[in-house]
Amino acid sequence: MKLPWGDGEKRKKELNDEIASHLQMAARDREARGESRDQAGVTAQRELGNAAVIQDVTHDQWAWTWLEALLQDLRYGARTLLKNPGFTIIAVLTLALGIGANTAIFSLVNGVLLRPLPYAQPEKLVGTTTYYPKGPLVVMRQQSHTMQLVGVSDNKEFNLTGTGDPVRLIGNSVSADFFSMLGAQPAMGRTFHDGEDQPDKDRVVILSRALWEQRFQADPNIVGRRITLEGEDREIVGVMPADFRLPSPKTELWVPLDLDPRNTGNYWGDSYMQLIGRLRPGATLEQARAELKTMRPIVLAAYAWRMPVNSFVNSSIVSLEEAIVGDARGKLLILLGAVSLLLLIACANVANLLLARATTREREVAVRVALGASRWRILRQLITESVLLALLGGALGMCVAVGGLSILKATLPPDTPRLADVALDGQVLAFTAVLAILTGVSFGLVPALGASKVDMTTTLKSGGQRSASGGNHRASKMLVVGEVAVSMILVIAAGLLVKSLWILSGTSPGFRSERVVTARITPNEMFCAVPGRCLAFYDELLQRTRALPGVKNVAAVNGLPLGGGAEIFPGVIEAHPTPDGAKVPMFWEKVVTPDYLQIMNIPVLRGRAFTEVDAAPDAQAVVIVSKTTAEHFWPGQDAVGEHFRPKWEQQWRTVVGVVGDVREFTITQNSADWIDGVIYTPYGPHAIRGSGADAPPAEMTLVIETAGDQVQIAGDLKNTVASLNHDVPVSQISPLKSWVGEAMAEPRSTSALFAVFAALALLLGAVGIYGVISYSVAQRTREIGIRVALGARRQEVLLLVVGQGAKLALAGVAIGIAGGLMLTRLMSKLLFGVQATDPLTYGVVALLLMFVALAACFLPARRAMRVDPMVALRYE
Amino acid sequence: MKQRYQNRIELLQGTLDLLILQTLRWGAQHGYGIALAIRANSGDILQVDTGSLYPALHRLERQRLIAAEWKVSENNQRVRVYRLSAAGKKKLASERSRWAQISQAIAGILGPAGEESEA
């Protein structure tokens, strides 16, 4: 079949020519038979009949007229929309908000959850759900038939010295075949060779493109250059392209894992890392999971000591995407759910506008029916109009989405996984287009069905009066009730989140953050391997810092609260020895100088704080425990005087004090789930190292109690450190307050997003109620006039109108509460200190919605009150 | 107006198509020529209505039973000329045998009855 696109006009012209030539031939024949020229023309014309109709019917044979009809519908629709600019603007804006918000959130979901990872055969990539040390990795690499496994350390820090100012870089240790397993190609140079993760062969490093550009001025001859990282000499062998962001977007360099079995503690004990891998051809995820289970006893048997029987028991294999995205999935889906509710409200609103307009268009429709349009034709016309409206809304919505997405990316915490992959791309465009069309059909269908049912005779006879409006009005009331209900759900969700945030910012993290400035001091780990060098450095640094102008006091800690880091080690409690094979309790250790507790305002509840004496090499080894730790291990007893030691030591340490709990892990959690206690030790030779090393931690954070200007301190502090040692980077000089603020970033961004959705929902809901009530007032002008004429008082009229609105709002609120009770349970993970069914929030939100609804009724009600019975009765 | 023409097409459809295809068997021809040929070959009995002819021609063209092209006639006039396609020839053959069957059948029914009434 010949494609008709575009040649409809041409065919019409040709047909015209064809008929004309027919006429000419007929006329010529008649002339030849003796008729006069004029006579022949007229007779031929008469014989032919109505040329226009013939052309029309003939043209119809091509049956592609639906396309022309569509164009006609579009033209007609556009004209109608232009004729009602007020209606069009409100509808398009409403839809743009709904569609735009959905597009923005969808592009987020698409980038983070849906788009495949940018590596070869991404569906074959997997990851473990728990961490393993190097030893188990090597064992499993030998054993596994289903996967090629590689190890990837968490972000570590490396000092780069010898090229300008010393800097702290973020890098990861990876198996030598990490890049080849992923199928990732370097932008320059090479990736690691097999075996480069073996001891003494690992003096190589690969740079990220960003690091190469920023720190090495994009030197084209970088490959082969040698740099000093953490005091070790390494050769740069390659540069990765900008879009390679594994394991994290923050990664600036990669070094090989140093797989040295002689370093037993590190090899089997504390080198815990994520394992990722590629399924071998033919292997499935289920097989890999089953194999992981069968490998567990082999791994445990490889240990030189007896491991707890349930070590690694909870580990499983998931797709790499899932392993990377983790918890972000739930939150994103909740956002998507919320934003689709918003679109629902927008649709209901536009449907309502269309319903109201359909009533005024009854006459127009009736006229068209009278002129021979079929019901289907009318329906099609009306649907075309709403799709046109939705497409306009979608186009504007794309603009909303572009703006919304950039705000969204700025609002979301930067460590949101895969955030860099998020963009408005072809997929998102397609999503928006489909969404817009579906939206158009869904909000247009009900009003169009109603409008196309017009009874021609009644409508035309009744002049201006509306006939079928009863049914329409019922539909629009139902829409408003639904709209209020959905708004209610969104506002409840936002209310719960805002209340959580409020509770969260009200709860103390266990320390004070005002007038404290912090700075990270990060010498190489090697620097502290020399006995006494490190202690002398920090001793001198603290003294000099204390003498700086504007500094009241200063202390050092191995990591700030709220996830700043701590030493991790297994411990033994004298009073409760761990039975063989049971899980050994794990501890977080804060290594502090004596003034730390005082500066941070962490209260000493029992016993005493540290003194300078405790840090001395010949002093008795002492520890302080947190309140929860004391209650956990010595319930109902005084922990002071009890004994404790790291698993590998023989000498007991004495608990000398109990201090208040601090949010060491996150703003909502004191410690990670797998940590059993938090202890403090004095900075000095007695500090316990998770790696078993016999030196105090090298990296420390200064907490400086200040009185004056912070910038001044930053400059002074850097100079002070530089005067002590040129190779020690100073970084993250910032108020402690902003560190606490960062920890709140995630709950704050979620609450902010929901608050915006809720505000939009309220606005749209209010517009919906306003529209329906003012329409109903306009409809009832005559009735109200009669009432007033019969003696109804103004207040009674006001009550009549407001009461009507209140009834709708109440019904919506009731349904909304029921819906909220069902749906907000899904978001209980995002809440803190408040139940998903918090009656106060529900009550306040219900009142708020009723208030907004009544306010929306007020304008039309006032109009109704002012109805002049004389005018109203003459009306229409 | 339009309705009237459409009704007439439906009435004549099968037959007119057959007549057009049969006419084109003798060579390519324009619409006016086809109308003249049908009239002449039927001894002036069948007058093809232009309002039926062109829709039928275009319908056949769309079904690819005939093909059309613009030519210049001997009178130096631009005319649209139709000719039978391969599919059209096949169709004509099958339609002819169907027509033969039908007319035979109808004749069989009408034959005796007609003689009786005339008798």
Image (spheres, coloured by chain):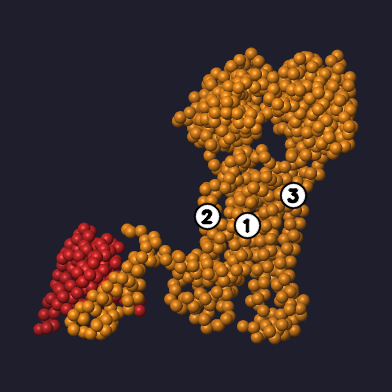
Q: At numbered mark 3, what does the secondary structure look like: helix, strand or loop?
A: helix
Indicate which disc, 2 or 1, sits on the residue closer to the N terminus: 1
Residue at the (72%, 27%) spot, across then down: A165
Give how far across and how far down residue A449 sits, in percent.
Answer: 51, 68
Residue placed most toward the observer, A369 or A252: A252
Q: At numbered mark 2, what does the secondary structure look like: helix, strand or loop?
A: helix
Position above or below: A548 against A692: below
Q: Are marks 2 and 3 on the same chain?
A: yes
Q: Name the chain letter of the residue that bears numbered label 1.
A: A
As shown in the figure, which amino acid type bears the numbered disc 1?
Leu
Query: The C terminus of chain A lies in which quarter of the figure?
Result: bottom right
Examine the image and state in which quarter residue A660 appears: top right
Q: Colour of chain A?
A: orange
Give how far across and how far down residue A555 sits, in percent.
Answer: 84, 28
Nearer the camera: disc 2 or disc 3? 2
Position above or below: A547 against A752: above
Q: Colour of chain B?
A: red
Q: At numbered mark 1, what does the secondary structure look like: helix, strand or loop?
A: helix
Q: Which mark is residue A97?
A: 1
How crowded pointer 3 is (Cα within 10 Å; few <14, some 14-19, many 20+) is rated as many
Q: Residue furthest front?
A: B76
Q: CA distance from mark 1 to mark 3?
A: 22 Å
Residue at the (52%, 54%) spot, across then down: A434
Report how many numbered discs are placed on residues in the image: 3
Q: Name the chain letter of the residue that bears numbered label 3.
A: A
Residue placed most toward the observer, A459 or A213: A213
